[in-house]
Image (spheres, rainbow, N blue to C red):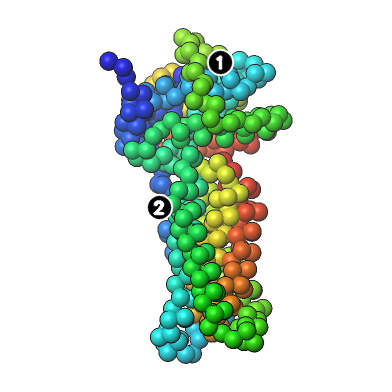
């Protein structure tokens, strides 16, 4: 049976908005190669690592603006619009002009999810600029793959406190990123 | 950092953010209090308000601007969501513009040509052109603040619509002070005041609504 991606994405993102981390990770994992495909198709010359920086920028934007998706509406046009805006923005800030016609995205094939995609460098720099505690939490959950509960135990914090700290850290990261990658 | 690691960190952060309308409503309510206070202190309602409201022409004057405000708020909220077209809000705004056109046409037909000039110029152009933008400023600040939490891929348009909404709300309030009830007057000068706020919103949008 053919999987219906559009329906999957709607149900995963709805579940994510109700706090389902597993569904949210699943959605982001499927969205990433699609975003990568868009960035590759448009971003020849960025290099692989530079391109991956832009992919991560788009993912951060999707995360920060997920409340602008309306329950039940198709996710793809929403995701493409965010990707388009952020890719243009990324090129503009890197001093290059591109135009990204949205119609083209229908033709963009998702880039294969490689087992080990290139390491991007921007994010590491931005995380370093966070305060120590926030950076440690982001690294524990991101790099070490710790759960919120484990991270709480590690730092002597309640789960709620870890979630609040992580939420603030993610917001802060988006702002820092905007400021640092000029 | 690898993208997979970033995804793990993002996925763990499921704390919800309120949708844009849930930020806009309280922001506009608060700014509305400021605007109303400014109105009451500086202008106040016209003394013959109750008697005037019995006149259908006056009712139309009081109807047009809130209708415009509703359409502009709806369109601005749509503009704050990626890939959401303005859709039927476009029609709504067009219908309000048509309503103004009809009111003007009816007035032109009803008045003898010699009276057009007096109705058009009225006696309070300056008050109208300064009051509407000033009354709109708190509302514009509030709507831009709320829209900034959205994700407008067309920030200039979103800013302009925020300006249109704020200007229309200000005109709604100002109409209670103003005793010029001819569509030739408000169709021209109110509209100019509202458009000035729209232009200001269009200027500020690209700066304030970037994300």
x and y, in percent, of residue A126 in the image: 58, 29
Can marks 1 and 2 be said to lie on one chain?
no
- Identify the residue at horizontal 46%, vertical 43% (top origin): B84
Residue drawn at (64%, 31%) of the image: A99
- Chain letter belonging to callout 1: A
Q: Nearer the viewer, residue A177 or B147?
A: B147
Q: Is residue B156 above or below residue B186?
A: above
To which residue does mark 1 refer?
Answer: A119
User: Farthest residue toward the left?
Assistant: A1
**Crowdedness of circle 2 by 10 Å Cα count: few (<14), some, many (20+)?**
few
The residue beneath circle 2 is B22
Residue B201, picture quadrant: bottom right
- CA distance separating discs 1 and 2: 38 Å
The answer to whether A52 is drawn above or below residue A19 in the figure is: above
Quadrant in which residue B124 is drawn: bottom right
Residue B15 image offset from top left, x and y in percent: 38, 38
Q: Where is residue B35 in the image (x, y as percent from the top left)?
A: 52, 71
Q: Which of A154 and A145 is in front in this view?
A: A145
Q: What kind of element bears circle 2?
A: helix
Q: Give the chain letter at badge 2.
A: B
Residue depicted at x 64% and y 64%: B196
* Residue located farthest toward the right when viewing the structure as drawn: A95
Can residue A176 be seen in the rendering of this structure? no
Q: Choose top left, top right, bottom left or bottom right for residue A182.
A: top right
Q: Which residue is drawn at 33% across and 38% down?
A: A72
Left or right: residue B46 compared with residue A4: right
């Amino acid at each position: 049976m053919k999987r219906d991606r559009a329906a999957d994405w709607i149900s995963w993102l709805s579940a994510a908005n109700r706090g389902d981390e597993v569904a949210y990770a699943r959605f982001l994992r499927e969205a990433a190669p699609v975003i990568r495909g868009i960035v590759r198709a448009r971003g020849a010359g960025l290099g692989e690592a530079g391109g991956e920086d832009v992919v991560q920028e788009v993912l951060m934007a999707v995360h920060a603006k997920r409340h602008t998706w309306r329950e039940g509406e198709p996710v793809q046009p929403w995701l493409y619009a965010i990707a388009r805006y952020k890719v243009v923005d990324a090129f503009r800030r890197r001093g290059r002009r591109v135009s990204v016609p949205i119609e083209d995205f229908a033709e963009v094939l998702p880039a294969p999810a490689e087992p080990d995609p290139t390491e991007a460098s921007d994010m590491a720099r931005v995380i370093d600029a966070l305060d120590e505690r926030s950076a440690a939490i982001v690294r524990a959950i991101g790099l070490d793959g710790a759960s919120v509960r484990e991270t709480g135990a590690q730092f002597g914090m309640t789960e709620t406190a870890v979630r609040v700290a992580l939420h603030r850290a993610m917001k802060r990261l988006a702002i820092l990123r905007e400021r640092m990658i000029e | 950092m690898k993208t997979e690691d970033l995804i793990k960190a993002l996925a763990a952060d499921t704390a919800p953010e309120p949708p844009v309308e849930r930020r806009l409503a309280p922001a506009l309510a608060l700014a509305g209090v400021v605007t109303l206070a400014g109105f009451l202190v500086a202008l106040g309602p016209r003394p013959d308000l109750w008697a005037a409201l019995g006149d259908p022409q006056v009712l139309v004057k009081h109807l047009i601007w809130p209708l415009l405000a509703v359409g502009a708020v709806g369109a601005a909220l749509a503009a704050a969501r990626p890939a959401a077209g303005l859709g039927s809000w476009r029609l709504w705004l067009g219908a309000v513009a048509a309503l103004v056109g009809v009111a003007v046409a009816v007035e032109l037909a009803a008045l003898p040509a010699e009276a057009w000039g007096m109705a058009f110029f009225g006696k309070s152009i300056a008050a109208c052109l300064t009051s509407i933008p000033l009354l709109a400023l708190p509302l514009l600040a509030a709507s831009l603040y709320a829209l900034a939490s959205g994700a407008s891929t067309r920030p200039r348009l979103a800013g302009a619509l925020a300006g249109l909404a704020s200007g229309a709300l200000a005109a709604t309030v100002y109409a209670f002070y103003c005793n010029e009830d001819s569509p030739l007057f408000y169709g021209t000068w109110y509209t100019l005041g509202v458009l000035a706020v729209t232009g200001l919103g269009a200027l500020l949008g690209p700066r304030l609504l970037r994300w």
